[in-house]
Image: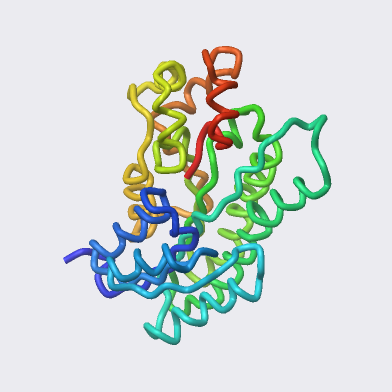
Amino acid sequence: MSHLAGKTAVVLGASAEGGTGWAVAEAFAQAGANVVVGARSLPTLQRLADKIRGTAVACDVSDESQVRNLAAIALRVYGQLDIAVNAAGLPVMGMIADSTDAALQSALQVNYLGNVYFVKHMAEAMSCGGAITLISSMSTTHPLIPHFAYTCAKSATDCLVRYAALEYGPKNVRVNSILPGAIVSDLSRELFANEDIRAAFEKEIPLGRLGYPTDFANSVLWLSGPAYVTGLNLQVNGGNHLTRFPYLAELPSAEQAYEGTGKPLFDR
């Protein structure tokens, strides 16, 4: 029997079918856990909840009251909360020279403050210990232009993980993050269909391939089990952290592909 059987897990940021949050929620359900999924978009989220026999809750991570309510619903429906994963993110793009207060605030609100709210309320709801995992990014240690606002906010989240591990360790709540590299999901599939862009990224990955949502779900499952680990920012990117991201100048047709999709060079 799985060590997750009978546990209750919250997965926030799970409404993108084929994305990391979706894959994490499916993996928890397959392991026997009760799963509460949250996101701003309820119709798609409900489809996932129906598929995994879980509970869907509309939740905007940038609104602390909604994050508090998400934890409260998990307790009300299942009587306990053991695992919490925040896969919600907003990939704000742009250069420092072009930055605006609005763009900076939106990046911070979702990618940093949302994680503070999430850790605070999920840890409070965990009465018998538990595991919290945040989805960060390899771009916090390896710059990827033009994602500076997103990445700086995620860097603050990596620091948050270490402080949270110290604060909640006495409660037996473990707090970690994973740092994915390039992800082939439904949101980025069109971009990586460009063979030049795909090859440039894969050239820098020792395992020779881009990551998929299931790769990150497997890592989250491990961190959510009995692992004797807390305060860790875990690089999950096929060894890409040993090299670097390709530079934009090295990506043939990248600018056209980038503008054509309006999507970041990596996504969840």
Residue 83 seen anywhere in this rendered image of the structure: no
Which residue occupies the extreme front position in the image? 260
Closest to the observer, 202 or 259: 259
Q: Is residue 21 left or right of residue 250?
A: left
Residue drawn at x 75%, y 46% as measured from the top left:
103
Q: Residue at x 82, y 42 (%)?
A: 100
The image quadrant that residue 194 belongs to is top left
Q: Position of residue 34 (x, y in %)?
A: 32, 73
Would residue 39 be found to the left or right of residue 218 on screen? right
Decide if residue 5 is in sight here: yes
Please give left or right for residue 228 compared with residue 96 in the image: left
Q: Position of residue 85 (x, y in %)?
A: 46, 60
Quarter holding residue 255:
top right
Locate the N terminus and report the quarter of the image it occupies: bottom left
Answer with the quarter of the image where residue 119 lies: bottom right
Residue ID at (58%, 71%): 67
Foreground residue among 228 and 83: 83
Q: Residue furthest left?
A: 1
How far across and how far down the image is residue 178, in percent?
47, 46
Residue at the (37%, 35%) spot, across then down: 211
Total numbered labels placed on residues in the image: 0
Front residue (pair 236, 55): 55
Q: Is residue 198 above or below residue 113?
A: above
